[in-house]
């Protein structure tokens, strides 16, 4: 195999070897064109049948679509070619032939349903608009990491095989761990707190969370990517400032660095322009204000009363009323988990960050006082003895601290206006899907 010397982004005058996939062959009789595609784009290869070696022409034109080939030759300017240049080949080599019966058409001319696309993800990812989603995901995660470093955080990795759950007993995947009962972790919650209580103080993690969600919805996964923050000497207001900065940094980076990908997705300046960097501060509505506003929209059959969680319908009504990202703060203590600090008997320091379409983040200041923490476990019907590995560290100098968890796929799907969260993951896990 000849080594690839250039990508599809070549200049006229170059003598090149390019390699990639056969995107399309157009045979016009005396002349034929092969469009070769790689990660950077496409380039036209010209075959003039009367003037070229028959074997060379045959190798090029008989390669089935999606075969991997390499082509050597001279790059010339050609205004009629899709990218303004074309290669006249000296040699063509088929590196990996493709079966002509493709389960999915990567040229996108024939639409495929999402399950077919996910079953054949490699072929699906060869489509420019699918590639664009994952290029943007990469930019988004890099921006998130950079922003965390900017505000003095250390990146951590915590275990995914754990002894106890934290986010309610019904959503755990049990596994067997050398004969003992164990679970896939639902959230790095307890571990990020245990770390923030050390000299590391401000930490973040980007990693998988596992939830045995019973329902099948366009915004739930059974394995999701959680972006988590925890900071010592922070309260819930500080934690909201950090998440607002992270979300805006992600949007700004995508806007600045992913213009081509946004264009490909129809979200650029030429497109329907659904993408915009959120401007101004995210409003912070108290839970009480939020339920009043939902009720005032008149969109719900039943009015919300104090203590109700915000249903999907309520989130939608409030989302269209507010029209952008917003926080809901001061939630009733009774509907927030044991690790959230209360402000008084009724109100907690818990908050959510909402996108008009759905919840993106939960967070709050944490209960750092040992006695109150243990009491909280008992109130939630959890056995504190099982969490001793966690609670005991609160006896040795646990500073006040606060944090949050942000769903990475939800951030991406709301940013790019994707219909289904599965489009934001390479190989999604849902109730039906365990492979690939
Ligand atoms: P021409 O003399 O215009 O270069 P040709 O006689 O070599 O064309 P044709 O079979 O007449 O070849 O061309 C078929 C079609 O392909 C025409 O519509 C022509 O404009 C187009 N075409 C020819 N060369 C190129 C090229 N390098 N890139 C894109 N399209 C081309
Ligand atoms: P919570 O359970 O609200 O909070 O999760 C935080 C955020 O993670 C995302 N998320 C999901 N995304 C896709 N599929 C799922 N099944 C799924 N479950 C959760 C959501 C959600 O807002 N420990 C707390 C966070 C904290 O207080 O620091 C927690 O896990 O975007």
Image: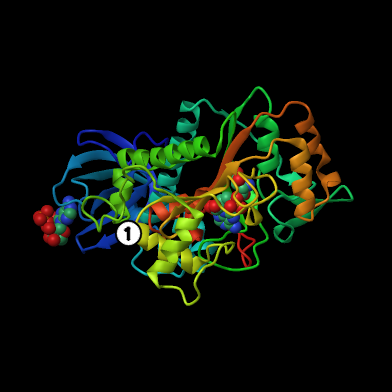
State the residue in front, 138 or 42.
138
* In this view, 394 is above or below 210: above
> Which residue is found at the position 67% from the left and 36% from the top?
193
Q: Residue at x 35, y 50 (%)?
A: 37
Coordinates of residue 347 in the picture (x, y in percent): 59, 50
Q: Is residue 346 visible?
A: yes
Whether disc 1's CB lies below 8 Å from ligand 1 is answered no
Residue drawn at 57 percent across, 47 percent down:
350
Q: Is residue 154 left or right of residue 185?
A: left
The residue sitting at 89% across, 50% down in the picture is 179
Q: Is residue 279 above or below residue 181?
A: above
Residue at the extreme front of the image, as rendered: 345
Q: Quadrant of ligand 1?
A: bottom left
Question: SS at mark 1?
Answer: strand
Question: In the displayed structure, does residue 172 sit left or right of residue 343?
Answer: right
**Residue 89 or residue 325, whichever sits in front:** 325
**Residue on which disc 1 sits:** 24
Residue 419 is at least partly visible in this image: no
Question: In the rendered view, would you say 269 is above or below 297?
Answer: above
- Compared to residue 419, the image places residue 331 above or below, namely above
Q: Residue 363: x and y, percent?
A: 57, 45
Q: Nearer the viewer, residue 225 or 367?
A: 367
Measured from the top left, where is residue 64 in percent x and y? 40, 60
- Report the front residue among 132 and 161: 161
Residue 318 screen position, x and y as percent: 41, 62
Quarter placement of the C terminus: bottom right
């Amino acid at each position: 195999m000849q080594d690839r010397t250039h990508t599809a982004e070549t200049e006229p005058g170059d003598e090149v070897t390019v390699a990639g996939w056969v995107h399309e062959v157009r045979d016009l009789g005396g002349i034929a064109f092969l469009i070769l595609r790689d990660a950077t784009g496409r380039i036209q290869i010209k075959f003039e049948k009367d003037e070229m070696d028959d074997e060379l022409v045959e190798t090029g034109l008989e390669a089935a679509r999606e075969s991997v080939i390499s082509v050597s030759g001279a790059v010339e300017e050609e205004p009629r070619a899709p990218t303004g240049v074309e290669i006249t080949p000296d040699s063509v080599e088929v590196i990996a032939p493709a079966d002509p019966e493709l389960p999915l058409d990567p040229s996108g001319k024939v639409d495929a349903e999402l399950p077919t696309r996910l079953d054949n993800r490699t072929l699906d990812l060869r489509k420019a608009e699918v590639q664009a989603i994952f290029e943007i995901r990469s930019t988004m995660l890099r921006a998130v990491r950079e922003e965390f470093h900017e505000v003095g955080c250390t990146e951590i990795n915590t275990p995914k095989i754990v002894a106890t759950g934290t986010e309610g007993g019904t959503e755990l995947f049990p596994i067997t761990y050398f004969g003992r009962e164990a679970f896939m972790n639902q959230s790095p919650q307890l571990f990020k707190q245990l770390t923030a209580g050390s000299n590391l103080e401000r930490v973040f993690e980007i990693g998988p969370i596992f939830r045995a969600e019973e329902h099948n919805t366009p915004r739930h996964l059974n394995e999701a990517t959680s972006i988590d923050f925890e900071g010592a000497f922070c309260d819930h207001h500080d934690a909201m400032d950090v998440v607002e900065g992270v979300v805006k940094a992600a949007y700004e980076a995508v806007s600045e660095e992913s213009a081509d990908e946004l264009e490909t997705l129809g979200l650029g300046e030429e497109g329907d322009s659904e993408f915009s960097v959120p401007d101004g501060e995210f409003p912070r509505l108290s839970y009480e204000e939020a339920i009043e506003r939902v009720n005032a929209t008149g969109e719900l059959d039943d009015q919300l009363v104090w203590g109700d969680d915000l249903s999907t319908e309520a989130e939608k009504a409030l989302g269209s009323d507010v029209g952008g990202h917003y926080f809901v703060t001061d939630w009733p203590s009774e509907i927030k988990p044991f690790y959230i600090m209360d402000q008084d008997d009724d109100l907690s320091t818990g908050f959510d960050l909402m996108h008009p379409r759905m919840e993106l983040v939960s967070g709050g200041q944490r209960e750092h006082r040992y006695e109150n923490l243990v009491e909280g476990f008992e109130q939630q019907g959890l056995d504190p003895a099982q969490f001793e590995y966690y609670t005991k560290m609160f006896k040795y100098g646990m500073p006040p601290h606060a944090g949050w968890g942000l769903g990475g796929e939800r951030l991406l799907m709301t940013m790019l206006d994707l219909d289904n969260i599965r489009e934001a993951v390479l190989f999604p896990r849902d109730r039906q899907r365990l492979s690939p």
